[in-house]
Image (cartoon, rainbow, N blue to C red):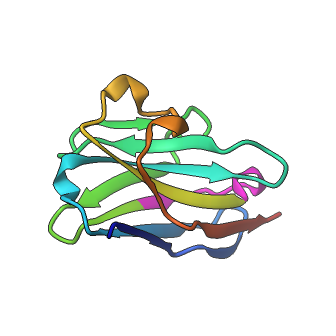
């Protein structure tokens, strides 16, 4: 069956960096758009970043553009989120999501994704 597993979260001071990883199995990884979402306590799950199947088209929400970088390694069935210059408002549970043959205009819509990981906690202290 399909498994999506995030790792790499933790506690970091403001201005620091973390690198999240998301390993997928049980699917044809290179057919899938992969994205990161996050959910802070008491808030809705929000889109963070997306990468198309080949890794040459990227998209970020405005609040992380220039600080976060999404990338993928199709040989390793893994997508990454490099997070730099972290702020306390980046504190959330970060989720990886996958959708096959994703129409690109749906990239930020959490309801359009087929598979989700269990999430990894990122806490940024001030």
Most extreme residue toward the front is 1
Q: Is residue 105 left or right of residue 45?
A: left
Above/below status of 34 relative to 46: below
Task: Judge by depth and name the residue closer to the eye, 124 or 55.
Answer: 55
Q: Position of residue 6 (x, y in %)?
A: 48, 70
Q: In which quarter of the image is the C terminus?
A: bottom right
Find the magenta span and give its range. Answer: 81-91
Residue, x 66% and y 67% (percent of image)?
Answer: 122
Q: In the picture provided, is 107 more to the left or to the right than 88? A: left
Establish if 119 lies above or below 86.
below
Who's the residue at 55% across and 58% down the image?
A: 95
The quadrant in which residue 50 appears is top left
Total tally of numbered discs in the picture:
0
Q: In this view, does 97 lie above or below 60?
A: below
Q: Position of residue 62 (x, y in %)?
A: 57, 32
At 50% across and 64% down in the image, what residue appears? 117
Q: In this picture, is 74 found above or below 101?
A: below
Give residue 16's position: percent from left, percent from top.
Answer: 62, 67
């Amino acid at each position: 069956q399909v498994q999506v597993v995030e790792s790499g979260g933790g506690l970091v001071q403001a201005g620091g960096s973390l690198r999240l990883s998301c390993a997928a199995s049980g699917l044809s990884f290179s057919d899938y758009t992969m994205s990161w979402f996050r959910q802070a306590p008491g808030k809705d799950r929000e889109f963070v970043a997306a990468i198309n199947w080949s890794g040459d088209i990227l998209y970020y929400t405005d609040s992380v553009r220039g600080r976060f970088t999404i990338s993928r390694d199709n040989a390793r069935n893994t997508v990454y989120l490099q997070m730099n210059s972290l702020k306390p408002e980046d504190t959330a549970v970060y989720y990886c999501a996958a959708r096959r043959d994703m129409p690109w205009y749906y990239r930020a819509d959490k309801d359009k994704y087929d598979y989700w990981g269990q999430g990894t906690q990122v806490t940024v202290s001030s």
